[in-house]
Image: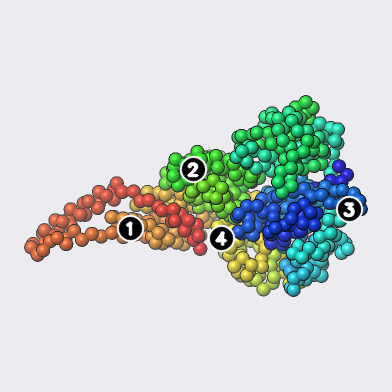
Amino acid sequence: MDNIRNFCIIAHIDHGKSTLADRLLEYTKTVAVTENQMLDDMDLERERGITIKSHAIQMDYLKDGQHYTLNLIDTPGHVDFSYEVSRSIAACEGALLLVDATQGVQAQTISNLYMAIDHDLAIIPVINKCDMINAMPDEVEDEIVDLIGCDRSEIIRASAKTGEGVPQILDAVVERIPHPTGDPKAPLQALIFDSVFNPFRGIIAYFKIENGELHSGENVKFVNTGEQYVADEIGVLKMDLVPRQTLSCGNVGYIVSGIKRATEVKVGDTITSIANPCDHAIAGFEEVKPMVFAGVYPIDPEDFEDLRASLEKLQLNDASLSFSPESSTALGFGFRCGFLGLLHMEIVQERLDREFNMDVITTVPNVSYKVYTKKGELLEVHNPSGMPDATEIDHIEEPIIRASIITTSEFIGPIMTLCLDKRGTLVNQEYVAGNRMELIFDLPLGEIVIDFYDKLKSISKGYASFDYHMNGFQRSALVKLDILLNGKQVDALSVLTHVDNAPSFGRQMCQKLKDLLPRQQFDIAIQAAIGAKIIARETVKQVRKDVTAKCYGGDISRKRKLLEKQKRGKKRMKQIGNVQVPQKAFLEVLKLD
């Protein structure tokens, strides 16, 4: 156990985590690196150049004649996947803190660092991309010293592209990161930190052994679910799964036990032996709190059960996804899904399409609100259609986030304007280093879920970095805005919005729908309403047919008779006619500026 080191790599987006992981694999001769980002095995990760999943891999390293086993977990950098990072940190004793020499310390770097410090991890600071022409290693060193108070000699300068500094990083991992602590003779206690679904072998769970040993063929029990299994195969994680007969205390590995149902494996559960069980479960991770909610509906209603199975399999691989069944009059049966952010929502939608061939419609994303009624009841509302009648509501509280934005001083004006437009309040501003400032804002979560991040990147030319955490609830003047088509409410297009924004937002939605709805044989009235009060209206004109074309001359009453007949027909059609909202309209409404 003294020769095992478990560590992860934490950094902001695009600071070179996955490229450094490639160099470490190459240097330890674990794998011949044939292409960039070997650990990012999803097509989506390669296309977008981001890490979505944490990836665990074992390396062997020889130092001073001693063999060391290094278990590396490469983690995502985007704020939407911070739950992946928290799970990786729980399975490690140390972390490489990677900072880009051209960009310096950014918001997500600080956030992930605090998470690692909370878990008492040993931190090894590394400055990456030192080979770049615009690198500023001295200034970045100053920032790291200010941030974690380490000695300058502890900071390693490296380049994940050229391999410079990789031997020093591996030596530092062996020397500075403590070996796992645990009792090999104690009853088995292993923490599940991830799982994947394999169509041929069932569910494969990844774990770290805290105490005891696990043997192939042993009878095991999952403590929280109470289910019992046989460990058909156990082993370590190289580029492929490598079977072993025994896994010792402190090691990271996998277990295959023929589990078929997705609900039987919970991330954060404890594996123990039936013959010699442990007396308590390991304290796992805190339950993930979804930030953004959206309805996910199959385009074909018959695919409802397939969609449920697909979401369950996806949840195995992405424990931060939560869902529950719901129904909508416009879209039929579907699921209310909770996501950690908009990128997370986009990725889940894309993975449903690619991995499970599911065509889905996603409704307007929103957040959860606390609604206090006049009777003194407290309701938690995730969906505008679940709102009680306006006459019963005493007041509504909305979730507030504490946002940290790090940017250069030239972009401060536009960024402040953006945050204030989104009903933000400035809490603090201070210089981090040089001409870079950190702005702390309190912002309503509902204002930032749709397009805040995109706008922030646009106005700062990609330089501003953004990170946030929940900061409680605050009373706010919110109203439910309904969209009516010919007097019928379309519940999938309802939104909760601030009373000041409602008229302009309602007008924009009506204008957008006017452009997107196909014309019918009758006029379609598109209205935006708050309760019974209509605040905006547009009309999609009917398709006209010239019924008098066949009249040649003669008395005017002949034409009038035909027109009256047509008018009655249109009126009857309008009463029984249904207006179908095409999927494109739902997607376009999400992009309202």
Q: Amino acid at mark 2?
A: Gly
Which of 113/164 is in front? 164
**Distance between the Cα atoms at labels 4 and 2?**
25 Å
Which circle's residue, 3 or 4, is located before the other in the chain? Answer: 3
Residue under pointer 1: 519
**Distance between the Cα atoms at labels 2 and 3?**
56 Å
Choose mark 3 or mark 4, whichever is in front: 3
Residue under pointer 4: 451
Q: Residue at x 61, y 43 (%)?
A: 315
Residue under pointer 3: 63
Mark 4 closeness class: few <14, some 14–19, many ≥20 residues within 10 Å:
some
Q: Amino acid at mark 1?
A: Arg
Asked if marks 1 and 2 touch (Cβ < 8 Å), the reply is no
Choose mark 3 or mark 1, whichever is in front: 3
Residue furthest out toward the right: 64
Q: Residue at x 69, y 53 (%)?
A: 39
**Distance between the Cα atoms at labels 3 and 4?**
50 Å
Residue furthest out toward the left: 554
Q: Amino acid at mark 4?
A: Asp
- 210 versus 165 height, above or below: above
Secondary-structure class at tag 1? loop
The image shows residue 74 at horizontal and vertical percentages of 73, 53
Which circle's residue, 4 or 2, is located before the other in the chain? Answer: 2
**In this image, 555 relative to 506: left or right?**
left
Which circle's residue, 4 or 1, is located before the other in the chain? Answer: 4
**Distance between the Cα atoms at labels 3 and 1?**
74 Å
Residue under pointer 2: 334
Q: Quadrant of residue 128?
A: bottom right
